[in-house]
Amino acid sequence: MSEDEHKKEIDEISGVETTGHSWDGLQELNNPLPRWWVWVWLVTIVWSLWYFVIYPSWPAPGGNLPGISGYTMQKELAENQALIQERQAAYLSRFEDASFGEILNDEELYAFAMAGGEATFKDNCATCHGSGGSGAKGFPNLNDDDWLWGGKLTDIQQTLRYGIRSGDPDARVSQMPSFGKDGLLSTKEINHVVDYVLSLSNPDEDSAHHAAGAKIFKEQCATCHGPDAKGMHEFGAPNLTDSIWLYGGDRSTVYETIYYARAGVMPAWKERLGENTIKQLSVYLHQLGGGEDEMANGGSTMQNSAPVEDAAQIEEMSYNEQGSNEGANQPTEH
Ligand code: HEC
Ligand code: HEC
């Protein structure tokens, strides 16, 4: 049968003309497209022509058709970034001049410091200190209230600016002597003092040589670690009584520490990050772990070698360096 013979065939049930196609007796009806569909289709065609004219569209050698609106995504990005920078600048100028006390008491500035500090920490510090600041062997945990160099905002700021044994002229430099390697103590004496050190955090430790060890400690170690072995911030000497170990608290590790000594190095950040970012980081770290109150009396309140009695004076000093004198403000404990 040729198609033409079926052209005018009308389906009995629906009364619609068939196309003449039939599959196993099923006839295809020749219904027109729904009108709404045709309209939508036409509108999309008009839309695409309009879009083609307005926006950059057709790829061509040496660029594309620019479109009459002059819009580009690069331009939009640049505008958005300028807007963000403008908004940041509004905070930054306030942040720059604010003392730590003002930052802690201002919700906006505090949030600004925390957000910036967290982001910078992930990018620059997590490699050594762990993503949550929890540390690793030789790299101190920054989440706890056990500080080597001090946990006041100004202590942290100082540590970050100049680093630790970083080679910067203002870096924190104090270093434990290599008692064994340099022959300051005999192997026997080192073993005695190891016994003593281990007994400080573990009362069950064998204390046969306790007295001998204690004597050596008093003569050789107390200047830095303190007579009570609780550590001293101005020498970066850890507390040896708290079972928190930077390098490890088993016998052989402690022996090794005393024989060879350690000298962890942290880079100076003042050139790389700048004052504002260091300020953000200081606030971030201060709240992460047990940040110490500026007026706290524990440990040392001294900066490197300059003894300063009053913590407020330290605040003033560090702000004078930045040319802004907000020293009278006392940060509140957070
Ligand atoms: C290359 C590894 C390294 C990087 C990167 C690093 N640190 Fe450190 N950091 C150390 C070491 C090692 C110490 C301990 C030094 C010592 O033994 O006294 C330390 C100590 C510190 C301390 C002193 C802790 C205390 O108890 O007093 C602070 C605070 C600190 N780091 C913060 C930071 C911040 C913030 C950054 C990122 C801007 C950072 N560190 C990046 C290695 C690093
Ligand atoms: C000049 C100061 C100084 C003297 C003296 C000194 N230490 Fe230290 N000690 C330090 C510093 C600083 C550290 C931290 C090293 C580091 O961060 O790399 C340290 C670290 C240690 C540690 C490692 C603690 C840990 O958490 O892993 C032990 C143990 C220790 N000292 C024991 C002693 C003993 C015992 C003596 C005396 C025989 C002594 N120290 C004398 C400054 C000193």
Image (cartoon, helix red, strand yellow):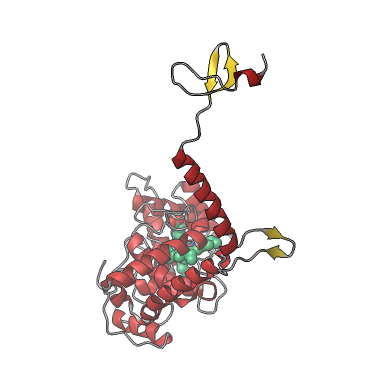
Residue 257, given in percent of the width and then of the height, sits at 51, 56
Residue 124, given in percent of the width and then of the height, sits at 51, 62
Residue 148, given in percent of the width and then of the height, sits at 41, 64
Q: Quadrant of residue 238?
A: bottom left
Residue 179 seen in render: no
Residue 75 seen in render: yes
Left or right: residue 112 versus residue 121 is: left
| Residue shown at 65% from the left, 21% from the top | 4
- Quarter of the image containing the C terminus? bottom left
Q: Which of 143 and 39 lies nearest the eye of the viewer? A: 39
Count of numbered circles in the view = 0
**Please, is residue 26 above or below residue 280 in the view?**
above
Q: Which of 237 and 7 lies nearest the eye of the viewer? A: 7
| Residue shown at 50% from the left, 42% from the top | 38
Residue 57, given in percent of the width and then of the height, sits at 62, 59
Residue at the outermost right position: 61
Q: Quadrant of residue 8?
A: top right
- Quarter of the image containing the N terminus? top right
**Please, is residue 94 above or below residue 262 in the view?**
below
Left or right: residue 180 versus residue 121 is: right
| Residue shown at 33% from the left, 44% from the top | 204
Q: Which of 303 and 185 lies nearest the eye of the viewer? A: 303
Q: Which of 61 and 165 lies nearest the eye of the viewer? A: 61
| Residue shown at 58% from the left, 56% from the top | 49
